[in-house]
Image: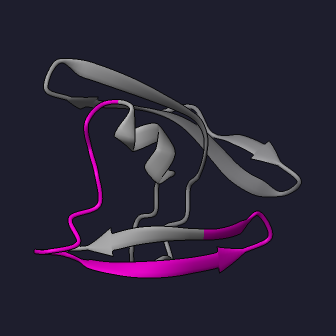
Amino acid sequence: MKINLHNGFPIVSLTLRHHNQTALLPNVLFDTGCAATVFDTDLLAQIGIHIDFINGRAKRMYGVGGTKFATNR
């Protein structure tokens, strides 16, 4: 795994595979102190991964880039 520093933050590229489809996430913050993993739901939807509002718990994530929803299973 190649870790690049951008403004002092460790950034990696990540390829996710789901049902023979792949999504490249080129700018993922490598945060070993985080209690959960958060991915862009729009990118995951492109390969068929969607928030499960029935069996999961959606959480609203706030940050500099705005607001996103994430699911916690």
Q: Quadrant of residue 59?
A: bottom left
13 or 10, nearer to the observer: 13
Q: Left or right? Give the position of 24 relative to 3.
A: left
Q: Is residue 54 above or below residue 8?
A: below
Name the residue rendered at 83%, 57% in the picture: 8
Classify residue 15 as left or right of residue 12.
Answer: left
Depth check, front residue: 1 or 14: 14
Residue 3 visible? The answer is: yes
Q: Residue at x 51, y 51 (%)?
A: 40
- Say above or below: 30 vs 34: above
Image quadrant assignment for residue 36? bottom left
Residue at coordinates 68% horizontally, 52% vertically from top-left?
Answer: 10
Q: In terms of image quadrants, where is residue 17?
A: top left
Label count reads: 0
For the C terminus, the image quarter is: bottom left
Up the image or down, 8 lies above or below 44; here it is: below
Q: Which residues are magenta?
A: 47-67
